[in-house]
Image (cartoon, grey):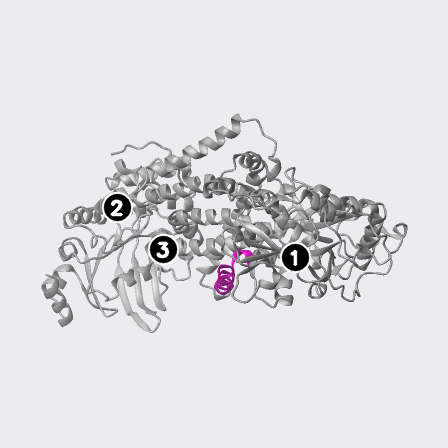
């Protein structure tokens, strides 16, 4: 497998993904498609399986059934660690490593997985921190940072591996309201640079303004898919209409 | 709190200053119990002889011995060829004790040296606890047990005995002013102290049919008499006479001879060649007068009628007329000396400066290094096995989790002293080829294995307290499970449990004293046993206080280190904190700071 440069967009798709935790079916045949360079917003009520879907796409949870296609090719038989290097992920609670400095957080994976020299890894990490406006905090501990700053570092950490696709799992849900905008802007910038992105979000404004496609999930299934104007202006199903009336 | 700490340090400073300025004074003569009294120390035959000596049918004393010249030194089944490895209980002066020069001596041990010299054998002594001694002789960790051991029927089931070299001679010690005036006055409802595992205990149980209060050693039981915590002490007469001082708040209420049994050396009962050789040596030292000289030096008192040491055909030794000597000197012990004031008693017990000066150099030179060796090596073992246990304990594989669980349950659920005895005495004989009869490896193993159970639980709880999001984030970056655990989860878990680990280390430091039960040669003694030996030698608690100060000097800084680490973890840390060594290069890079 040859590494592609990050700027070269690739597509990510899930086909008929099933996943159960014990006897509890969480994903019940989900189809999702993010064409190269597109931004897909995933919306839906809590417990609808949105986060689990993201985790099955990078095989943090192995799907029971179905297929995952990255750049049009099934990756279910690939080495999962290699797959995850190509798919970056950002979490609701940032999950920075608190015992390491900001710089170390960003350097760790490139240093270990790409076998970069210390100097090269540091240059790379500083460049990514610069990109999210956090270079000045490189020496700090995550605990000394605000939530918004931590999430910026988390994004830089994911970008440092040069992923071809980014997954955002409610990246702004744990932030104070005044910090949400900055992070959303950062994510939108990434999209406009051509990164293929799947964004699980409760920010309907963001889904409407920034995404190319909106996917509405409920009870482990995709209920409606379409461009934002169709989803938000002309919802077809009762469930979506009810959901929108509750969140808007 | 600050004032108390200040005082403590002032006290310590005073002790150290006194010690460093004062020339080392010779041991104050009257504090040393571990030296021969000479014939002038003779005690008379019992004035209040409760039970007349009734020689029972003696079916064990041999009629004769083989000639010394026919002893085959290579057929004695010794652990080390031509060397007698001897276990002795150092806390029983004048019969067995450790003198201030660190030599195991006393009547029992000096006589054994003389016998060994007759046979042409070397002797190596190890100090151990009385109740573990016979088991260790039976397991051949020691060739010979030498500690005024009564050759009773019950003990003959475990070990074999030589012919007798001494006899049981008991006295009854009571607090001053007690109504108990002799053995006949003992009855149910009284607290009668004995040293556990001794013939005195057997006497109280089998002859008096009473339930005794058991103590680990003479010093403790005597202190309990003086402080009225028990009503009486059934004591070996020589030892009791030795520990009693004029002015003590205790008195001798009576004497008696022990049962028909005599005092002998214990040997593995399957090792008849060694028993025969020692019997031959004993008769030889009786014949040349050595026995009489040592007996007169250390335990001068008349022989019971009808008894003499050695085989039935051994010569009857020639002894001075102890009864007459005792009548001349009539030792002060029987006379009422003015009782000492409580303050003076306290000072003598706890703050005997001469004793501090005697004890501290040995604590520094012998005790401290040994305690540190024991603690650090068992700590390393505990950490290594503890990490494995923690990893196994959080494993998803049942075949890993289950054994870790069982191990932890067993080692956490047993008293440490029990584990030490089981491993030291149980595995000792099996591993003796590897350990060369040195109790340290087994003691360290026992301490380390116990610590591992606790350390494992500490690590496991620490690792499991790390949020699952940490592992998830690391895995999402493409790091393997192993790398994620090693770089992200475990380092965080360990940091959280550092305070608990230091506490465990402190517990280990204190627990290292238990190695004492396995029997140590003089140079192997750790802090506690050094203090204990001086305590047994002198009857004063000051050496124990000195040992205690050493423990505090080690543990108090550690305790404060815990608090420091704890508060740093709680309130965040400086960014200058040393990093994971893997990334040291990276973190030292200077960054712009806010």
Please provide the residue range marked out in magenta.
B400-418
Q: With B523 as the anchor, is A228 left or right in this view?
A: left
Q: How far apart, in angstroms, are the residues tagged by discs 1 and 2? A: 89 Å
Towards the viewer: B172 or B547? B172
Q: With B437 as the anchor, is A134 left or right in this view?
A: left
Q: Which residue is mark 1?
A: B48
Asked if the stretch drawn in magenta spans residue B412, the answer is yes
Q: Is residue B300 visible?
A: yes
Same chain shared by disc 1 and disc 2: no
The answer to which of marks 3 and 1 sits earlier in the sequence is 1
Q: With B111 as the anchor, is B174 left or right in this view?
A: left
Q: Residue at x 48, y 66 (%)?
A: B398
- Assess disc 3: are there few (<14), some (14-19) or many (≥20) residues with their C-alpha within 10 Å of its C-alpha: some
Asked if the stretch drawn in magenta spans residue A156, the answer is no
> Do the numbered discs 3 and 1 sit on residues whose CB atoms are within 8 Å?
no
Q: Position of residue A70 (x, y in %)?
A: 34, 57
Determine the secondary structure under disc 1: loop
Q: How far apart, in angstroms, are the residues tagged by discs 3 and 1? A: 71 Å
> Do the numbered discs 3 and 2 sit on residues whose CB atoms are within 8 Å?
no
> Do the numbered discs 1 and 2 sit on residues whose CB atoms are within 8 Å?
no
Give the number of the disc on residue B465. Answer: 3
Q: With B461 as the anchor, is B385 left or right in this view?
A: right
Q: Which residue is mark 2?
A: A150
Towards the viewer: B81 or B12? B12
Q: Position of residue B452 (x, y in %)?
A: 50, 54
Give the number of the disc on residue B175. Answer: none
Chain letter of disc 2? A
Q: Is residue B159 visible?
A: no
Chain letter of disc 1? B
Same chain shared by disc 3 and disc 2: no
């Amino acid at each position: 497998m040859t590494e592609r440069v990050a700027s070269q967009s690739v597509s990510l798709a899930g086909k008929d993904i099933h996943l159960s935790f014990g006897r509890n079916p969480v994903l019940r045949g989900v189809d999702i498609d993010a064409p190269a360079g597109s931004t897909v917003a995933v919306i839906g009520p809590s417990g609808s399986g949105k986060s689990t879907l993201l985790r099955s796409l990078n095989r943090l949870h192995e799907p029971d059934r179905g297929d995952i296609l990255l750049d049009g090719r099934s990756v279910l038989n690939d080495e999962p660690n290699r797959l995850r290097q190509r798919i970056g992920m950002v979490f609701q609670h940032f999950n920075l490593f608190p015992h390491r400095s900001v710089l170390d957080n960003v350097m760790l994976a490139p240093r270990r997985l790409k076998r970069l020299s210390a100097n090269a890894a540091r240059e790379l990490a500083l460049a990514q921190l610069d990109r999210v406006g956090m270079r000045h905090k490189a020496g700090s501990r995550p605990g000394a940072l605000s939530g918004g700053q931590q999430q910026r570092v988390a994004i830089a950490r994911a970008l440092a591996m040069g992923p071809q696709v980014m997954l955002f799992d409610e990246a702004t849900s744990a932030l104070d309201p005044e910090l949400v905008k900055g992070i959303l802007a950062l994510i939108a910038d990434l999209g406009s640079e051509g990164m293929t992105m799947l964004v699980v979000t409760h920010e309907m404004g963001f889904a409407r303004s920034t995404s190319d496609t909106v996917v509405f999930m409920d009870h482990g299934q995709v209920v409606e898919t379409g461009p934002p104007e169709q989803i938000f202006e002309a919802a077809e199903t009762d469930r979506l209409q009810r959901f929108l009336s509750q969140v808007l | 709190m600050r004032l108390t700490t200040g005082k403590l340090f002032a006290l310590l400073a005073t002790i150290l200053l006194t010690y460093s300025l004062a020339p080392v004074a010779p041991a104050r003569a009257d504090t040393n119990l571990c030296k021969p009294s000479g014939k002038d120390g003779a005690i008379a035959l019992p004035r209040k002889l409760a039970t007349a000596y009734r020689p029972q049918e003696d079916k064990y004393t041999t009629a004769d011995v083989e000639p010394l010249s026919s002893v085959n030194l290579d057929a004695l089944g010794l652990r080390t060829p031509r060397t007698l490895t001897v276990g002795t209980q150092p806390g029983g002066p004048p019969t067995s004790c450790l003198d201030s020069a660190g030599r195991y001596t006393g009547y029992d041990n000096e006589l054994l040296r003389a016998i060994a010299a007759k046979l042409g054998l070397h002797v190596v002594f190890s100090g151990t606890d009385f109740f573990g001694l016979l088991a260790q002789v039976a397991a051949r960790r020691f060739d010979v047990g030498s500690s005024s051991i009564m050759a009773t029927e019950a003990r003959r089931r475990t070990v074999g005995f030589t012919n007798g070299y001494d006899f049981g001679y008991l006295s009854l010690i009571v607090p001053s002013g007690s109504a108990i005036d002799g053995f006949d006055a003992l009855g149910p409802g009284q607290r009668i102290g004995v040293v556990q595992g001794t013939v005195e205990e057997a006497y109280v149980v089998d002859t008096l049919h009473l339930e005794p209060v058991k103590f680990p050693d003479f010093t403790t039981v005597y202190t309990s008499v003086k402080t009225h915590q028990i009503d009486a002490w059934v004591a070996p007469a020589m030892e009791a006479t030795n520990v009693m001082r004029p002015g003590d708040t205790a008195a001798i209420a009576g004497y008696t001879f022990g049962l028909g049994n005599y005092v002998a050396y214990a040997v593995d009962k399957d090792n008849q060649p060694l028993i025969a050789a020692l019997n031959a040596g004993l008769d030889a030292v009786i014949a040349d007068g050595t026995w009489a000289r040592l007996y007169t030096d250390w335990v001068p008192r008349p022989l019971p009628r009808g008894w003499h040491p050695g085989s039935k055909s051994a010569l009857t030794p020639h002894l001075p007329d102890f009864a007459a000597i005792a009548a001349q000197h009539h030792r002060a012990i029987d006379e009422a000396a003015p009782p000492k004031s409580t303050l003076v008693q306290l000072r003598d017990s706890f703050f005997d400066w001469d004793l501090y000066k005697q004890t501290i150099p040995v604590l520094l030179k012998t005790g401290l290094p040994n305690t540190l060796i024991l603690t650090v090596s068992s700590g390393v073992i505990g950490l290594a096995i503890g990490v494995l246990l923690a990893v196994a304990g959080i494993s998803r594989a049942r075949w890993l989790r289950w054994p870790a669980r069982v191990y932890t349950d067993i080692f956490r659920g047993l008293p440490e002293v029990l584990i030490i005895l089981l491993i030291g005495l149980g595995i000792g004989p099996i591993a003796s080829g590897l350990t060369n009869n040195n109790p340290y490896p087994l003691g360290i193993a026992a301490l380390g294995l116990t610590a591992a159970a606790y350390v494992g639980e500490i690590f496991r709880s620490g690792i499991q307290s790390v949020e699952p999001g940490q592992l998830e984030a690391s895995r999402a970056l493409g790091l393997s499970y192993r790398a994620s655990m090693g770089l992200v989860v475990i380092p965080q878990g360990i940091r959280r449990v550092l305070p608990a680990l230091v506490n465990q280390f402190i517990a280990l430091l204190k627990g290292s004293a238990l190695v004492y039960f396995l029997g140590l040669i003089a140079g192997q003694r750790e802090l506690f046993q050094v203090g204990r030996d001086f305590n047994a030698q002198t009857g004063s608690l000051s050496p124990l206080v000195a040992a205690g100060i050493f423990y505090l000097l080690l543990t108090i800084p550690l305790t404060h280190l815990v608090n420091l680490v704890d508060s740093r973890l709680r309130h965040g840390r400086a960014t200058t904190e040393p990093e994971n060594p893997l990334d040291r290069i990276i973190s030292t890079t200077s960054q712009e700071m806010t």
